[in-house]
Amino acid sequence: MARQVTGAARRVADAAEVLRDEKFNARRVELAEAALETLGELGFARTSLREIAQNSAFTHGVFHYYFSDKLDLICCCVRHYKAKCVTRYDDVVATATSRDELTEGFLAKLAATLQNEARMHRLWYDLRSQAMFEAAFRKDVLEIDKSLEAMIWRIASRYAELGGKRPASSPAALYALFDGLFQNALLKHLAGDKTAVPELLDEVRRLLPTVC
Amino acid sequence: MARQVTGAARRVADAAEVLRDEKFNARRVELAEAALETLGELGFARTSLREIAQNSAFTHGVFHYYFSDKLDLICCCVRHYKAKCVTRYDDVVATATSRDELTEGFLAKLAATLQNEARMHRLWYDLRSQAMFEAAFRKDVLEIDKSLEAMIWRIASRYAELGGKRPASSPAALYALFDGLFQNALLKHLAGDKTAVPELLDEVRRLLPTVC
DNA sequence: ATTCGTTCTTGACAAGTGTCAAGATTTTGG
DNA sequence: CCAAAATCTTGACACTTGTCAAGAACGAAT
């Protein structure tokens, strides 16, 4: 009987701890989301914890309560960002019933992303570059890169399938191609080049039938 | 006669000034080269002028004598870096007399670059990302990007020519593809992935005949 | 309602930052 | 050879940075 009580008590205690952990983690995500705002605005190099705090509803001390240090915070930001990013085109892939439909849906989302979420994406490129210097970022960054490659591959596979074909290149090559084009268009777009977005769309429209 | 003397004096003065300017600029390049060492090691975010000075034969004051501020120094570094980079494959393109020769020469240089100049290249990716935040970098970065695109295009054109064909993609798409592949391979290589280099070579070897 | 553990605020600290200026040193031109 | 201009050194400045600790505010369980 003592056994059962202990078992029950343990269960209750465990449940409580899980709950606390979840709450703790939810707060971490809240803070990470707030941090992403400032990071997207200033970039990794120019962003300090105090600046993050000032641009948010929190004080700088809270960040040190929830994160062991700055890298811990940024890693949490990156992981959180990932979840949002990777599913961006899943709707289009799931609902498109023809090559044209898929193409137009993809291009529309691509253009919208480039214009409305430029800040988040430049942060991604920033952090991916940081990972080349800071080993602490590498694991997460490589993981996200893999996820993005898979995302592109899903689009390409579906596009090929709708045409009764198979993709003509490897997942790595396809991802490299689209990522490179997007990165270049993003830089031009941020530099005020109005032609960046339409030129990206043209390029992708021309490319899709040749690679899948 | 007074006219002639003034004219001659002016010419001499001008020549002297040009000489001084050249000397001044040579020194700037020396300093930039020293700065590139530290920048390649630490990345833009973590590099301070004092650190640059300590890792070099100069004192930190000199850098402020030759550069108006930190951005000015970094811009000079980037411009200097460009000149070296853009001509890397020109020999191979000029001397190759067959597709195979060009392929092997290109791949050899590609592998060597990835392994021996990883630090300089991660710095390039770092600065290109910085340009998305810092407007002062954009002009130079976009210019270098264009030069690199042209470099890739020269290789692809020559490769196509040697096969009696024409490149199947636009310069932008080709550059995006190779740049994306290289960037990804660099990250993996820096993360200690021994397969990064051979996999890049395989991918490029497979890709070349399909895009040109 | 009181107590105890969690959460948050505030202020401080040491280290590091870019920038500048006064003066030492070297080079140059007459 | 000497004055003037350039190059360079040194040390200081005002400011920002990440980190931490002391304690206030809060919430939940007894």
Image (cartoon, coloured by chain):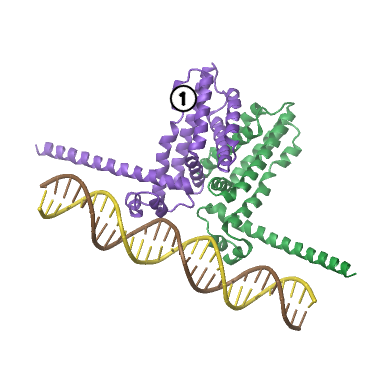
Chain colours: A purple, B green, C yellow, D brown
Residue type at tag 1: Val
- Provide residue B212's location: percent of width, then percent of height: 68, 28
User: On the image, which quarter does residue A137 sit in?
Assistant: top left
Secondary structure state at the residue bearing disc 1: helix
Viewport quadrant of the N terminus of chain B: bottom right
User: On the image, which quarter does residue A25 sit in?
Assistant: top left
Q: Would residue B9 be visible to someone looking at this image? A: yes
- Provide residue B103's location: percent of width, then percent of height: 68, 34
In the image, is A47 to the left or to the right of B162? left
Residue for point 58% across, 29% down: A204
Q: Say if B64 sits above or below A148 in the image.
A: below
- Provide residue A75's location: percent of width, then percent of height: 41, 45
Q: Say if B45 sits above or below B17 in the image.
A: above
Q: Nearer the viewer, residue A46 or B195?
A: A46
Residue for point 39% across, 48% down: A73
- Provide residue B184's location: percent of width, then percent of height: 54, 38
In the image, is B137 to the left or to the right of A97? right
Residue highlighted by disc 1? A92
In the image, is C14 to the left or to the right of B77? left
Residue extending furthest toward the right = B1
Residue for point 66% across, 60% down: B28
